[in-house]
Amino acid sequence: MVAHRILAAAIGLWSIGVSAANIGIMPVGASLAQGRDRAAITVTNQGQEGVVMQVDTVAWTQENGEDRYLPTRDLLVNPPLFTLKAGRSQVLRIGLRQPPTGEREIAYRLILREVPQVAPTPSADAAAAGQVQVLLQMRLPVYVEPARPEPGRRWQARWTGDGRLDLTLDNTGNVHLVVGELKLRPAEAAPDSAPLATVKASTSVLPGQSRTWPLQPGTAAPGQRYMLEVTTDRGPYHVALDPALP
């Protein structure tokens, strides 16, 4: 079992030397549904010093490819504030205040923040040493599935005037899709051949939303057909592409 490790979220990162908590998370999110409205996440302090963590809940939506967050009371989190000694773990218990309804998945995020234990007092010596306190912040997804999950996706490809290939995913289903990696190859190429272009995406696309990734295929040219290898949280698959001309 491998914990998801996030070393620092750069809040005010304007110095060479930094200090931040080292926190492990397992699992890195939660999925709730009707009849499964409780979940648990374990937070482990992998650092050498104690840390105080605060948990806030936000509703998560997307608009024009941008994430939007609003505070919400839909989720219950216990405990919302806790102290972790070095090497110790804390179990966060997550639940819904109301049973899930609706035909489309609802998304939330838990915002885990490191709480400063002592108010920073910058000194000339610290500034000279280039040391700054950097507070850890993590955003963990919480998905509430509909009664009948129906994944759906539609890909479009279009050349731009400067030789770039834009790949657009429309999430036509009622549940999210996390795109991990994209690999573009000529249609006739072997599946294990070197790709013309690769994108490390790690992007969540919520139901009804779209996301575009620009690729620079290099030797590729308009008029050719391609095969796109897509890695997602629901498994890998291939898409035949016949890109539109600019």
Image: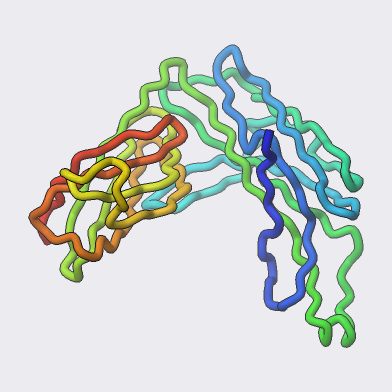
| Residue depicted at x 30% and y 59% | 215
- Front one among 157 and 173: 157
Whole-percent x, y for residue 197 in the image: 31, 57
Query: Residue at left 79%, top 39%?
Result: 80
Q: Nearer the viewer, residue 36 or 159?
A: 159
Q: How many marks?
A: 0
Identify whether 97 is placed above or below 177: above
Q: Residue farthest to the top?
A: 35
Residue 179, position as x, y percentages in the image: 42, 42
In this rendering, would 148 be left or right of 98? Answer: left
> Is residue 204 left or right of 191 when viewed as pictured?
right
- Taking the view exactly as shown, the residue that stands out farthest to the left is 223
The quadrant holding residue 73 is top right
Q: Is residue 215 above or below residue 68?
A: below
Query: Height in image: 119 above or below 83?
Result: below
Instruction: Give the quarter of the figure containing the N terminus.
Output: top right
Would you identify the image quadrant in which residue 175 lies?
top left
Colour scheme of the picture: rainbow
Q: Quadrant of the C terminus?
A: bottom left
Q: Residue at x 43, y 34 (%)?
A: 176
Q: Position of residue 90 (x, y in %)?
A: 83, 35
Q: Is residue 60 left or right of residue 137?
A: left
Q: Position of residue 39 (x, y in %)?
A: 68, 24
- Where residue 218 sits, quadrant-wise, is bottom left
* Left or right: where 80 falls relative to 98: right
